[in-house]
Image (spheres, helix red, strand yellow):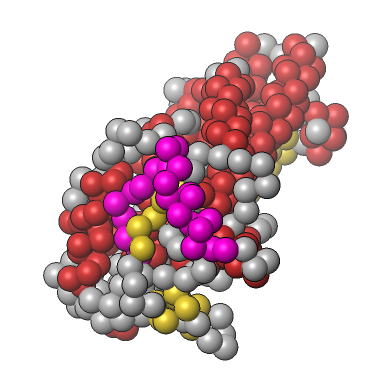
Amino acid sequence: MNNYSELSKLYYQKVNIEEELRRRLENPCVYKTSLYILPILRGERVLKEVELFFLPINDILMLQDEIMQNSKEILKLSGELPKIAQKYCIREIMINEITKSEGIEGVHTTKKDVYNSMNSTKIDRLSGIIKKYKQITEKKIEKIDSAKEIRRIYDEIFGEEILINPENRLDGKLFRKNSVFITDGFKNIHLGDLTEEIILKHIEDLIKFSNRKDISFLFKACIAHYYFKYIHPFYDGNGRCGRMIFSMYLARKLDIFTGLSLSYAIFSEKEKYSKLFLNTSSSKNFGEVTFFIKGMMEFIKKGQKSIKEMLENKIEKLNFSRDYLGNLELNDPEKKIMCIYIQNNIFSEFPLKDKELSKILEISRTKLKIHIENLIKKGYLVEISKNPMIHVIDDGLKEVLD
């Protein structure tokens, strides 16, 4: 498998593509998916259908091993965190994942937008996607067994954003009825399935494929992600919905942190992500998804690397802060309060409200106020807001701990 190249590249090197394709399809290790596409040529689908296939080349087998090992290390590191720190950490990663997934599609959303929506009783455009990602963090991860389930997930995510626009309302039984074109601003680069009948057939095929037991779950997840975007069952939101489903699967099969780092990894390499889809759908690629799997697994590994580095860095800060806290002249309630403020400072970009701290410690606001006033006098805390009441670590102490 040395120097194993994409068929589209070999085409331009004047290799005998028919002979090379035959060798690949007859290789004893080839995996044929029973998923079919009409490849794209100059923005249009060609008439000859091809089956998606891949070969388990060394690159993707090595990536599989690395991803599995990374997941074990992430679980070990996250297990070292106190419950409060772990809660903040997962929340921050989730907020980041949502903003990056939105950003990949050119939708400007800030971390503050997501945080405010999470803490509001009002329903807004982010409520649906936050709810679905929260289910991942709470390990309430759904298995998708029908086309109706996919439609239900989509409605829950985008009911208050995409679907309120009349142009995006789904006009078929479950999905869109009319065709959609994806452009790069100048020309068509992708055409979704032409009719709802074809969409439903391909979605059923995708669900059957997703339930197969004769393929590594990582390879299966990557292929399913490609095929979902190829089908393009909705008028808008296909990318965000597809990545959310991918994240659900990774969180269930690996760990929550890996599941919530996918869009972060993709965001800085959006062009590579887009090219993976375009190259895989190219008529000169003949349905091979080997390199799509490789590219997506590289994104998974990259996301895991960022998570590991973040956890290692924050655990080091937490351990230092604990030691420092132990040398301060504080009574037990004050130590507990400062310990939570320190965890918030290290693991969250958003300050802790007094009422939240009261719930965490399970003490009255009156008792909490007395302790906080003492900590202010000692120079460890400072008030930054009265409505709602919020305190944070004093800048002097923060400088020492950071």
Q: Which residues are magenta?
A: 16-37
Return the residue nearer the eye: 44 or 285: 285
Residue projecting furthest to the left = 173
> Is residue 363 rendered to the left or right of residue 350?
left
Please tell me whether residue 27 belongs to the stretch shown in magenta: yes
Q: Is residue 176 left or right of residue 338?
A: left
Quarter holding the N terminus is top right
Residue 34 x %, y %: 29, 51
Q: Is 382 drawn above or below residue 289 in the view shown?
A: above
Q: Residue at x 61, y 45 (%)?
A: 298
Q: How many numbered tags mark residues here? A: 0
**Percent x, y for residue 383?**
68, 42
Residue at 23% from the left image edge and 46% from the top image edge: 208
Residue 141 visible to an observer of this rendering: yes
Image quadrant occupied by the C terminus: top right
Q: Is residue 188 above or below residue 240?
A: below
